[in-house]
Image: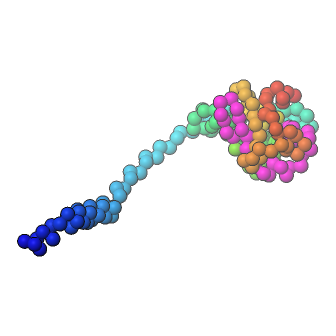
Amino acid sequence: MNALRRFFSLFNILALILLAAAAYALQVVQRPQATPQMPKLEMAELHPVKLTVYYSDSQVQNMKPVVRTVQVTEESAGVLAQAAADAWAAGTGSKDSDVLPVVPKNTPAPRIYVRGLHYYADLPAAYTKLNYGSSGERMLLCTLTRTLLDKRDGDVTFLVNGQSTDTLGHLDLQGAYTRQDCQN
């Protein structure tokens, strides 16, 4: 009886309960997780949208609007702005000698972010090496500004490689550009 009391002492019973709890916890932890369901991929249907994209004239004095048709999945401000910037960077697509693209062929398009009426154009680092001079730099910034603000009011803040910068060549980038800043 004495041996039975030692075997069923309070310490041994608590140790046995803890051992059972640990064995159960080990079993729960070692169970394979349920395989998550794969999301159903839905192909977004592209549809054409006409946008006005601004380019330079042959003397780099005035902006020339060109209506371009782009394919988009939705007509939100961000998607339309990025599509317009992509068309702007791709060039005119025509042999019209009176309208010139603003950036060289195969130059990456800026990444556009929209927050309310504010557009943020993140220019790739390659734009700092274009060496356009002040009139060419102004044409670059203003044609992109007018392209983004063609259908909506607002302003465009320019970043370079994801960072705020004071200038792009000769032009001040500390303030946002509006449509009125870029009148012909």
Q: Which residues are magenta?
A: 112-140
Answer above or below: position of 17 versus 141: below
Q: Which of 6/88 is in front?
A: 6
Q: Looking at the image, how many numbered discs can be counted on the residues?
A: 0
Q: Quadrant of the C terminus?
A: top right
Q: Which of the 4 image quarters holds residue 12? A: bottom left
User: Residue 149 location in percent, x, y?
Assistant: 73, 30
Q: Is residue 58 visible?
A: no
Q: Specify whether residue 52 is painted magenta.
A: no
Q: Specify whether residue 130 is painted magenta.
A: yes
Which residue is situated farthest in the left direction here? 1
Answer above or below: position of 52 versus 106: above
Which residue is situated farthest in the front direction here? 2
The residue that appears at 38% across and 53% down in the rendered structure is: 36
User: Residue 94 location in percent, x, y?
Assistant: 78, 40
Q: Which of 109/175 is in front?
A: 175
Q: Quadrant of the N terminus?
A: bottom left
Answer above or below: position of 65 versus 11: above
Q: Which of the 4 image quarters holds residue 137? A: top right
Q: Which of the 4 image quarters holds residue 157? A: top right
Left or right: residue 180 versus residue 2 is right
User: Residue 165 location in percent, x, y?
Assistant: 80, 44
The residue that appears at 88% across and 45% down in the rendered structure is: 169
Q: Which of 109/91 is in front?
A: 109
User: Residue 14 location in percent, x, y?
Assistant: 23, 63
The residue that appears at 77% across and 40% down in the rendered structure is: 158
